[in-house]
Image (tube, grey):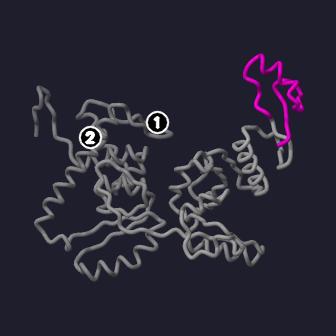
Amino acid sequence: MWHCRSGRLYHGAMTLTELRYITAVARERHFGRAAEACFVSQPTLSVAVRKLEDELGVMLFERNAAEVSVTPAGEKIVEQALRVLEEAEVIKQIAEQGRDQLAGPLRLGAINTIGPYLFPDLIPNLHELAPDMPLFVEEDFTAALTEKLKQGQLDVIVISPPYDEPGVLTLPLYEEPFVVLLPTAHPLSKHDTIGQQQLIDESLLLLGLSIDSHYAHLAWVRNIKEKFSVDIPFPIIADLSMDVAHSYGMVQPGASDTSAVRATFIIDDKGVLRAMVYYPMTNGRSIDEFLRLVTALQTSDANGVATPEGWQPGDKVIVPPPATAADAEARLNEGYECTDWYFCKKAL
């Protein structure tokens, strides 16, 4: 069938299926993976994409052996295709409003750190409340769940805040309390509850992060205590999805999503990142060096000085260099231990 639009002649018309194909290619950057995601063969998807490109008279993708990239025009068209698919899903939802909503399927997604705790209670409760409603659940990263939600592949997702996605309605479900782990000799261990202000008064707080689950942490802490006689006195974040690790740049370039993260961040009481220390997987970290570095940073802040390499408490510190020629001339006579006018030390 021929259609005339704005003075141009087109044969056929683009379909929602073709729009789904091009959004999948843009997301996967690979025709084979896009075809798998759409549950079709690669030739079927490739022919449909080429047909749409011919119909529009513009190339959507640059194809090479390594990967597929989206052209500038393709980016705009893919963005519009996503909006069209979202609106098409709205049409389905309007139609479903006239039917029993509890008889239709519910497609629910959750991040990996929540799913194992939420689904075992949620699934039987939903089945009791809506026995005729088919329930489909899946676990994934926040970014992947968001993409599927926007494309209509999921109806609801459960994630951890903060979360601000345009066009997505976000509602709080529940709150989880924070638990403070302390050595038995610590003064705060006498309190039943601890306020945030009490923690602010502490000079150093340690927080661990691991890509293992909460239950794996419990097993590791017990094993380390049993085998090495070492207590783990600090809390550990279960970052199965690696959302926290990726957000703070704690994954080394080229590392796979299952590689252990060996990064230590030192953050001051104003929330400013002061130091980052990365270790390869083959070498252990030095806790003594971390403590030395924290003490050196606190000493510099408190006294307006710098500390030399290998500085330890009690060692002399470096005086800031003079800012003017007159100050430089006078520096050598101010009683400091000077190598030259720009490098002088003093005892605290």
Q: Identify the image quadrant of residue 311.
A: top right
Q: Position of residue 33 (x, y in %)?
A: 42, 51
Task: List the single residue furthest toward the top.
Answer: 325
State whether residue 230 is above or below residue 270. below
- The answer to whether residue 326 is magenta is yes
Task: List the single residue furthest toward the bottom.
Answer: 128
Kindly identify which numbered label has been placed on residue 42.
none
Q: Position of residue 207 (x, y in %)?
A: 62, 61
Identify the residue at horizontal 46%, vertical 36% (top origin).
64
Which residue range is magenta in the image? 319-348
Q: Nearer the viewer, mark 1 or mark 2?
A: 2
State whether residue 300 is above or below residue 342. below
Three-letter amino acid code at the position of disc 2: Gln
Q: Say whether disc 1 or disc 2 marks the residue closer to the N-terminus.
A: 1
SS class, disc 1: loop
Identify the residue at horizontal 75%, vertical 72% (top origin).
230
Identify the residue at horizontal 59%, vertical 58% (top origin).
200
Three-letter amino acid code at the position of disc 1: Asn
Q: Nearer the viewer, residue 236 or 87?
A: 236
- Around disc 1, counting alpha carbons within 10 Å, would you say few (fewer than 14), some (14 to 19), or many (20 or more)? few
Kindly identify which numbered label has been placed on residue 64.
1
* Image side of residue 307 versus residue 51, left or right: right
Q: Which residue is mark 2?
A: 80
Separation of disc 1 and disc 2 at Cα?
Answer: 25 Å
